[in-house]
Image (cartoon, grey):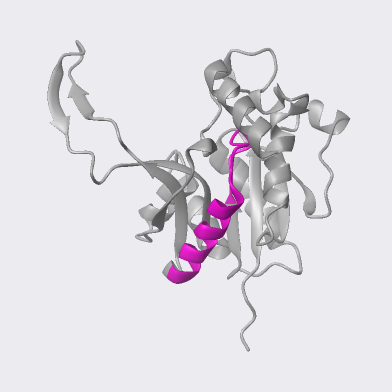
Amino acid sequence: MTEQPKVWAIIPAAGIGSRMLAEIPKQYLKIHGTPMLHHTLSRICASPVIDGVVIGINPQDSRWSKDPFTHPKILGVCDGGRERADTVLNGLKFLERLDQVAQSDWALVHDAVRPGIMQQDIQNLLTLANDNQIGAVLGKRLVDTLKITDEEQVIQQTVARKKFWRAFTPQVFRLGDLLRAIEAAVADGVQITDESMAMERLGLGPAMVEGHSSNNKITTIDDLDLADLFLAEFQ
């Protein structure tokens, strides 16, 4: 009987949160008295399909060492890089060095500032990835009408939204494939905005799966207020 591939999560948490305009990195802003990063890690570690978690932390980050998140699934911390892709790449290399990790295992990458991830969404993502055998990306279909404007903000065109999605995380791919894809993007000097973009460059097309709207990325104070409401209901 073929052994099922394991699932290893990478949580890049090395950002400085400049768009939030807060005094501390946004992953450390507190929701119900707990850092946002801890909420995210708690929900990821609670997933029965995830075998272990590695966290990418900025080497200059003193907050993590003072208040780390502890859980049996936490495998350790890797250095955060200058860009998100660098942090994810460091996380993949961290996992690659572990005896229990195989190249054919799944690497699941999730933003530290998406504390509203639902357990069912993680399960649905892995189910689709196993069917697709390349990978899968959580997201939401666009519901707003899309406009294209010129430099003066004058509308030039209305775009049909049927094929458009907002890409969320988690995103999950074979560990070896994702490692190769990000290394190729870095070598080519291409700044990738998510893991799927790296895979797409190699002609590997992941599948999209619809996720819950609670899984928004926290980038503004308004987003933080919504996360507060969600976590109050689903703690």
Q: Nearer the viewer, residue 35 or 95?
A: 35
- Image coordinates of residue 66 in percent, x first then y, are 87, 29
- The answer to whether residue 176 is seen in the rendering is yes
- Image coordinates of residue 155 in percent, x first then y, are 15, 19
Query: For this view, does 88 lie left or right of residue 171?
Result: right
Q: Nearer the viewer, residue 16 or 53?
A: 53
What residue is at 41 percent from the left and 47 percent from the top?
Answer: 197
Does residue 124 belong to the magenta stretch?
yes
The image quarter in which residue 41 lies: top right
Query: For this view, does 187 lie left or right of residue 80?
Result: left
Give the magenta range. Answer: 109-131
In the image, residue 16 above or below residue 168: above
What residue is at 59 percent from the left and 38 percent from the top?
Answer: 116
Q: Nearer the viewer, residue 186 or 154?
A: 154
Quarter placement of the N terminus: bottom right
The image quarter in which residue 2 lies: bottom right
- Image coordinates of residue 138 in percent, x first then y, are 47, 49
